[in-house]
């Protein structure tokens, strides 16, 4: 039996917030830049009917690279990057709610589920408008794609992201008004709240189980770095059906229930797994980077008076 680990979690009140937000934003931007091509591929796989354009993740990557170039893999990135603001909102809400719940419960799973769900509601208020716009940009580069906004196919090459974003914003406003920018908000909540509810308890569970089978002298950061991707895979697998529906609702013209019925009718149960491989390929490395980066960030942001009493 391994010796009990002397781990004390770095809490919100222990950190220098100025360091936390400035370093955290740059860290999140770097991670998003690295995984964005897979996010774009996941979106196209989820929206396409059957295998009309791409046979899978690798096929989509090679075709986008061949016909649209490197820029094609980063369509909508500048608009999508605005969702990083939601990351700050998510973390802030998560930590504050976790701190509040800790007054009533010491159970990590309980604190994580409540804090994660609350953070998802707040974060999606920032994410959904950018998601709606960026997903239309992602899809506009696909040959023959005609979305609900009736975007014109650009022959040969892509337009600048902000120029295209302006056209999409105008069209969304003309067709749906301000509500159009929150299209799929309920679907997003129905995906992200369960995602958080699965991810956080799974993360703590895997970390605890791994710690039982590893030497006590192992840095806790290594255990967290293993547990993060494992939790991400579990959460992605459970919530992928709702992720497919969310994406289709945001770029299409049907409700959640109509989208569900259409997908089931046209593609069967298999349709709810669309984009799962691409989602895991983007989420698992992101989880590793975020867990290691987040815990490192918390260590960097730790107030001087707590350095000797907190461990990672």
Image (cartoon, rainbow, N blue to C red):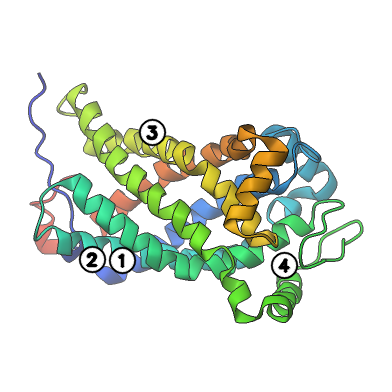
Label 3, label 1: how many angstroms apart (C-alpha)?
24 Å
Residue 229, compared with residue 117, is above or below; it is above
Determine the residue positioned at 7% across, 26% down. 3
- Judged by depth in the image, the label closer to the viewer, 4 or 3, is 3
Q: Residues within 10 Å of mark 4 (few under 14, many from 20)?
A: some
Q: Is residue 100 above or below residue 50?
A: below
The C terminus sits in image quarter: top left
Q: Would you name the residue on which mark 4 appears?
A: 161
The Cα–Cα distance between marks 2 and 3, rounded to whole angstroms, is 25 Å
Q: Position of residue 297 (x, y in %)?
A: 31, 55
Residue nearest the viewer, comparing 237 with 245: 245
Q: Where residue 86 sits in the image (x, y, percent)?
A: 44, 66
Residue holding disc 3: 230
Q: Residue visible at 57% across and 54% down?
A: 246
Q: What residue is shown with label 2?
A: 96
Q: Residues within 10 Å of mark 2 (few under 14, many from 20)?
A: some
Residue shown at 65%/49% (left/top)?
Answer: 43
Q: Which residue is mark 1?
A: 92
Q: Residues within 10 Å of mark 1 (few under 14, many from 20)?
A: some
Is residue 41 visible from the viewing direction of this image? no
Local SS, label 1: helix
Nearer the N terminus, badge 2 or badge 3? Answer: 2
Label 1 – label 2 distance at C-alpha? 6 Å
């Amino acid at each position: 039996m391994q010796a009990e680990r002397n781990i004390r979690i770095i809490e919100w009140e222990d950190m220098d917030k100025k360091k936390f937000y400035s370093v955290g934003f740059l860290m999140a931007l770097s991670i998003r830049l690295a995984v964005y091509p897979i996010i774009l591929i996941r979106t196209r796989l989820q929206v396409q009917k059957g295998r009309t354009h791409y046979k899978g993740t690798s096929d989509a990557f090679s075709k986008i690279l061949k016909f649209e170039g490197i820029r094609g893999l980063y369509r909508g990135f500048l608009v999508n990057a605005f969702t990083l603001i939601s990351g700050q909102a998510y973390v802030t809400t998560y930590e504050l709610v976790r701190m509040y719940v800790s007054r009533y419960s010491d159970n990590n799973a309980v604190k994580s589920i409540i804090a994660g769900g609350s953070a998802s509601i707040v974060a999606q208020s920032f994410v959904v408008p950018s998601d709606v716009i960026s997903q239309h940009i992602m899809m506009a580069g696909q040959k023959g794609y005609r979305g609900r906004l009736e975007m014109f196919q650009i022959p040969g090459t892509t337009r600048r992201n902000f120029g295209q974003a302006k056209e999409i914003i105008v069209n969304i406003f003309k067709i749906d008004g301000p509500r159009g920018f929150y299209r799929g908000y309920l679907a997003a909540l129905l995906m992200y709240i369960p995602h958080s509810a699965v991810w956080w308890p799974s993360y703590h569970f895997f970390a605890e189980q791994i710690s039982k089978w590893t030497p006590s002298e192992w840095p806790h950061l290594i255990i967290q770095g293993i547990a993060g991707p494992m939790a991400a895979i579990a959460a992605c697998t459970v919530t992928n059906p709702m992720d497919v529906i969310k994406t289709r609702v945001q770029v299409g013209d049907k409700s959640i229930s109509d989208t569900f019925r259409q997908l089931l009718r046209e593609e069967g149960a298999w349709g709810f797994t669309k984009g799962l491989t691409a989602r895991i390929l983007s989420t698992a490395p992101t989880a590793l980077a975020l867990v290691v980066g987040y815990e490192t960030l918390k260590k960097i942001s730790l107030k001087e008076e707590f350095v000797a009493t907190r461990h990672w």
